[in-house]
Amino acid sequence: MNKFLIQENFSIKKTLKHLNKTSYKCLILIEKKTNILMGTVSDGDIRKAIIKGLSLQDKVKRIYNKNPFYFLENSFTNKNIKEIFI
């Protein structure tokens, strides 16, 4: 599995460890059986979940961003992407 991919059955704790280990700011959550993009998880999502009272044993599928912004490979140029983000 790629370093930035996680599965929906990961616990929040396992996801947090994965974020720390890889030093990425955001991980991509995929559906276990089909490898389809489900969303993203950031350390901010985890902080918000902890503040709301979720435990580190809860599944990450309870807290992930279900509507991530993404680009399909070869569908945009770097210039297009910069214009969108600016």
Image (cartoon, grey):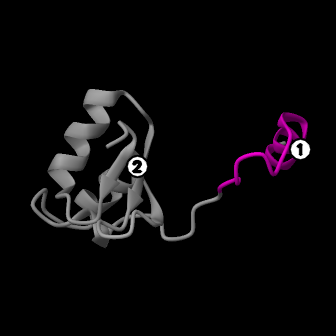
Is 68 left or right of 14, judged from the image as shown? right
Residue depicted at 47% across the width and 63% down the height: 39
Rendering quarter of residue 10? bottom left
Residue depicted at 70% across the width and 54% down the height: 72
Rendering coords of residue 74 (x, y %): 78, 46
Residue that protrudes farthest toward the left in the picture: 57
Residue 44, which numbered label?
2
Residue 86 belongs to the span the image colors magenta: no
- Identify residue type, mark 1: Asn
- SS of the residue under disc 2: helix
Residue depicted at 37% across the width and 47% down the height: 5
Crowd class of label 2 (few under 14; some 14 to 19; many from 20; radius 10 Å): few
Which residue range is magenta in the image?
A: 70-85
Q: Is residue 36 above or below residue 18?
A: below
Q: Quadrant of the C terminus?
A: top right
Q: Quadrant of the N terminus?
A: top left
Residue 80, which numbered label?
1
